[in-house]
Image: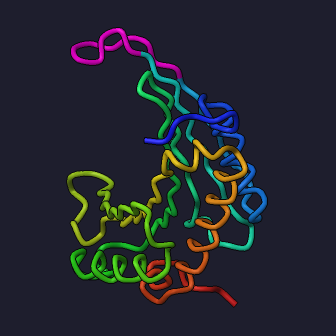
Amino acid sequence: MNSPTSDSILTLEPLLEAVQDGLASSGWELSGLQKTTSREFEGRWAGESTRSAYLFFHRSDLPDSVSVESFLDETSRGLKGNLSLVVDGPRLHEVGALQSVLQRLATATSETLPPGYRTPISARVVLDDPDTPPGDGEVQVRIRLLLPRAAMDAGASAVSALVSGAVSAFERLLERPEVAELLPPVMD
């Protein structure tokens, strides 16, 4: 584990600013920010407190179904955060078997995102209500990049550069057929 330096990010606000700077420099606009503080925990978390921030970004040249989100968390154990490419995709019957979708996304992600980072992939299907046929469920895909502690220890400029680079990789990922097939058709 790296020791903090004078440049290290140690609290939520500088981390939030560094993430915002990295996204803004890449052309993404902040479309929402939510901050929370939690102090009332039970059980093993009793006595703990957390401060969290959720950031939502969009670009005017991309469909509304595409966004970048960030979750940042400050606890007594330190900071953690992630950056996610979120694609609200088509109905399940339009994409086929989720296992195949996830395999194609995993391949595209490993070939496009920078190596050496944890990049979990998730897909969820939402049914409007219990009577909705499963094939009509809406698919959402989320490809995350976990922000490493080493970047936060290196300071705000390192976090901003990492975020900017990750967002550029997300944009390249949107051009891959494995992800592009989840986007709405382009209207002429």
Position of residue 42 measured from the top left corner of the image (x, y, whole percent): 26, 12
Residue depicted at x 58% and y 43%? 152
Q: How many marks?
A: 0
Q: Quadrant of residue 43?
A: top left
Residue depicted at x 38% and y 11%? 40
Rendered position, 183 above or below 86: below
| Quadrant housing the N terminus | top left
| Residue 90 falls left or right of residue 147 | left
| Residue 104 falls left or right of residue 181 | left
Q: Nearer the viewer, residue 176 or 45?
A: 45
Q: Is residue 66 covered in magenta?
A: no
Position of residue 157 measured from the top left corner of the image (x, y, whole percent): 72, 50
Q: Which residues are magenta?
A: 37-48
Position of residue 113 measured from the top left corner of the image (x, y, whole percent): 49, 74
| Residue 167 falls left or right of residue 24 | left
What colour scheme was applied to this rendering of the protein? rainbow
Residue depicted at x 76% and y 56%? 24
| Quadrant housing the C terminus | bottom right
Rendered position, 156 above or below 171: above
